[in-house]
Image: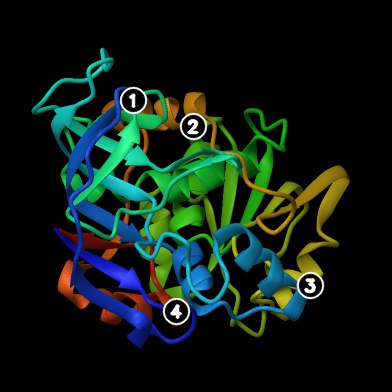
Amino acid sequence: MKAIECVKYGEVENLILTDVEKPTPKDDEVLIKIHATSVTTSDVLIRGLKASPVAKFIVQLIFGFGKPRNPILGMVSSGVIESTGKNVTQFAIGDDVVAYGSVSPTKRRFGSYAEYICLPENWNLASKPKNISFEQAAAIPYGGLLAAHLLKKTNLKRGDKILIYGASGSIGTMAIQLAKNAGAEVTSVCSRKNFELVKSLGSDKLIDYTDDQAVAQLESYDYIIDAVGNSKSSLLKVESKKALTRNGKYISIDQGTPLTPRETFIHLIKLATQGKIKPVIDRVYPLEKMVEAHKYVEKGHKAGNVIITV
């Protein structure tokens, strides 16, 4: 099968299109013929390995030294089940599915930058909503799971005021929608060019972080969600930490290890089926253009998700 392998950490040119052996499902696994996957910020960070010496060591301890232990990156997949192990009961050949290759820190599997992938049926695997495409389905798991992880650290209730910094990214666009589903008043921070996008997702108020008057637009918030993390900052971001109510809470994506439990994944797919969350896609590339896709994501200005068709 065709696959993209990361032959060593570093530049995007280390991503090589190659032929590898097609996987065979174990007794409790399904074989998915992938139609779409996603290039996430995490994929780019792992491939580039641009971090402090300590962080580099930890990443390589987890993923492999010198190059990824599994050279085929990618954890998001949507496609069709081609075969099943003998003990599989929840899925059948021909089912359209969406999957995320991480259930917990100890149950994680890369490999979606390819034509096929095998995953256990009881991992983050679900039937694809019929009302969305394979490309849209691949735009749900990463941002949705991380946004849900951040919001689980809140006690968000109807009427609460929440500010989302980095609102136009894959995490931010999902955080807006999940917060609106909870009845919150959402203020979105992003560049002006993405105002219409975040407004269409339910944002009540908008702040351009590059605006000279951005800090003056801050109000008082019950929660501030930093969907960008420590890699990017601004005067607005620094000052926003002072814009909390007495019992307010600032929550960053860089705080702790994000959890991706199956019940959250299933809930996200249910919301998509009901039309309560809308996947956001910035650009779509074919598998052969993986290098270009990584270059675009690495710029840090994507709106929503970058999808790869297989």
Whether residue 130 is visible, yes or no, is no
Helix, strand or loop for disc 4: loop
- Residue bearing the label numbered 2: 181
Q: Which residue lies at the image location 36% right of the left edge and 83% below the top edge?
A: 14
Q: Is residue 81 above or below residue 38?
A: above
User: Percent position (x, y) of residue 141?
Assistant: 40, 44
**Sequence-first disc among 1 and 4:** 4
User: Percent position (x, y) of residue 237?
Assistant: 72, 70
Helix, strand or loop for disc 1: loop
- Residue bearing the label numbered 1: 121
- Residue bearing the label numbered 4: 8
**Sequence-first disc among 1 and 3:** 1
Amino acid under label 4?
A: Lys
Most foreground residue, 206 or 20: 20
- The quadrant the N terminus occupies is bottom left
Amino acid under label 3?
A: Val
Q: Which residue lies at the image location 52% right of the left edge and 69% below the top edge?
A: 46
- Do labels 1 and 2 touch, CB within 8 Å? no
Measure how far apart labels 1 and 4 are at the Cα level: 31 Å
Measure how far apart labels 1 and 3 are at the Cα level: 44 Å
Measure how far apart labels 4 and 3 are at the Cα level: 36 Å
Amino acid under label 2?
A: Asn
Q: Is residue 239 above or below residue 173?
A: below
